[in-house]
Image (cartoon, grey):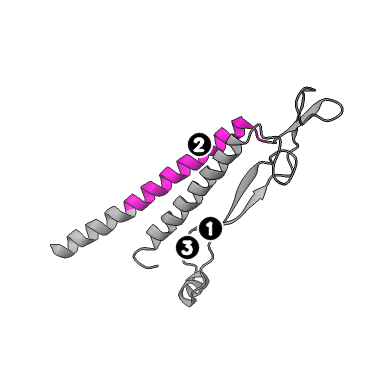
Amino acid sequence: MNLFSSMDISTSGLTAERLRMDIIAQNIANVNTTRTVQGGPYRRKLVVLKEIQPDSFESILDKVKGKYSGKGVEVVQIAEDDQTPLREVYDPGHPDADQNGYVEYPNVNIVSEMVDMISATRAYEANVTAFNASKAMFQKSLEIGRG
C-alpha cells in the first residue's frame, strides 16, 4: 500500500455513500409517482456496491502472502426493486385507477428509506473521520521529518 491508499479507500466510500444518498432522495421524491416514462408507477431503486478488486502484481502478491490489499468500494449498478410488490390503493377518482378503482403506487416505504438514509449518513461520516485520521497521521509524519 502506498502513502495515499487509505485516503483513496475513504474517498471511494464517500463517493458511494453520496450516490446512495442521491438514490434514497430520488425514492422519497417519487413516493407517490404513478406514471413514469416506461409506463406504470415508479419502482424503488437500490445501489449495489462491491469491493474494488486490486489488479496490480504487487496487490496480487500481497493477497497470496495474506496481507490486506483492498482498494475501496465501487458502484456496480443501480438496480430497480422488482421483488417488493407495488402498493394498491382504492381511489376510483384518480386518473390512473383501473376498472376496479385501484391505483398502483410505488413500492417505496418511507420508513425504510429513512433508515437507509441514516445508514448512508453514518457511513459517510465514518469515511470522513477515516480520511481525516489518515490526513492527521500524514501531518504528524511530516512534523517528525522536520524535527
Q: Is residue 74 above or below residue 107?
A: below
Please state which amino acid type lies under the numbered disc 2. Ile
**x 51%, y 73%: residue:** 60
Q: Which residues are magenta?
A: 108-133
State the residue position of label 3: 71
User: Which is nearer the eye, 92 or 15?
Assistant: 92
Q: Secondary structure at mark 3?
A: loop
Name the residue located 47 percent from the left edge and 52 percent from the top edge.
15
x, y percentage for residue 27? 60, 39
Decide if residue 86 is on the left or right side of residue 50: right
Magenta highlight on residue 124: yes
Q: Earlier in the sequence, mark 2 or mark 1?
A: 1
In the drawing, what numbered circle is on residue 74?
A: 1
Nearest the viewer among 52 and 113 is: 113
Residues tagged 2 and 1 counted as in contact (Cβ below 8 A) = no
Percent coordinates x, y for residue 46 in the rendering: 62, 46
Residue 89 percent location from the top left of the image: 76, 26
Residue under pointer 2 = 118
